[in-house]
Structures are given as structure tokens and as C-alpha cells.
Image: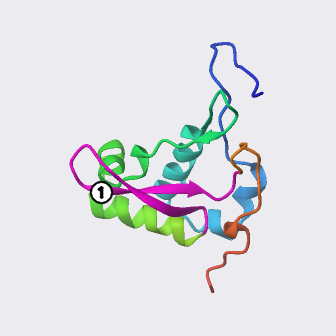
Amino acid sequence: MPQQSGQNEISHARVFGWWRNLPAWESMSPLEKIILVEALRDCTLTESGLVALNQIRLTAYGLSKQHRCSQRTASKALKAIEERGWISRVGEVSGPSGQVGGVYELLGLTQLGRIKSGPFVRWSEDS
């Protein structure tokens, strides 16, 4: 069972220190890092102990509104995170604007919220 914080919130995923030394992390723009960190933050453990991902944050429309950038910039950032192996598109969801956005899996965490090695560990700028 996940540990509870003082405000009855279930603990959430975070960026692990060794991830920040990987080429897949160091090569990302500040916007790309923020999007990934927020996706990890929103990846919370449910009462049943499984990971639940906030899917709205991973639509170009939602990201553009949240970060005050164009949808094209948000879409490029999302694609860069996926190309580096941090996330993988596993489906689609309709957003509030009627546009279709992606459902993504975080590749650095198991469904139990435990850290695992993902494609981002082996990513390099040459690949």
C-alpha cells in the first residue's frame, strides 16, 4: 500500500537523480523537461496500487494552454519526449476542444509505480 502524506494524498512519481545524467534527459529542452516532470507528477498511485496517468496533460492542445505556447511547439515537445524513449503512445482520447490527443505510457515506471529501465537509458543523439 502506498504511503500517505500528511494531507491524505497518495504519493506520486518523481524524477530520479540518475535519470538527469542520461543523454536522453540532458538533450531535452526546458519545455520538454517540464512536460515530462509534470507527467510524472500526475502519474499517481490509485487506492488499488496501480499507476493512473492524467491523460489530458498529454494533448498538444492542453499543453499549449498550460505552457502558453503554440500547439505546434507543444506537439514537437511531446514528440521529442517520445523519441527519446520516456513515453510511448498507446492510444487516443478526445480532448475538450474536440481534437484527438494521445494516451501515453510512462516507460520508466511499472504499473506498481516502481522504477524500471526504459528505452531512454539506451538513447543517444546518434540513434
Q: For the view shown, which residue lies furthest in the front direction?
A: 48
Q: Position of residue 93 (x, y in %)?
A: 36, 52
Disc count in the image?
1
Q: For the view shown, which residue lies furthest in the bottom direction?
A: 126
Q: Nearer the viewer, residue 41 or 19?
A: 41
Q: Element type at marker 1?
A: strand
Asked if residue 96 is among those painted magenta in the image, a careful observer would answer yes
Q: Residue at x 70, y 34 (%)?
A: 49
In terms of secondary structure, what is the magenta stretch mainly?
strand
| Residue position marked by numbered label 1 in the rendering | 100
Give the residue type at disc 1.
Val
Q: Nearer the viewer, residue 30 or 127?
A: 127
Q: Nearer the viewer, residue 22 or 8?
A: 8
Q: Position of residue 29 (x, y in %)?
A: 50, 62
Q: Residue at x 65, y 25 (%)?
A: 10
Can you say whether 11 is above or below 81 in the image? above
Instruction: Read off the magenta span.
Output: 85-109
Q: Residue at x 63, y 62 (%)?
A: 25
Badge 1: few (under 14), some or many (20 or more) residues near its Cα, within 10 Å?
some
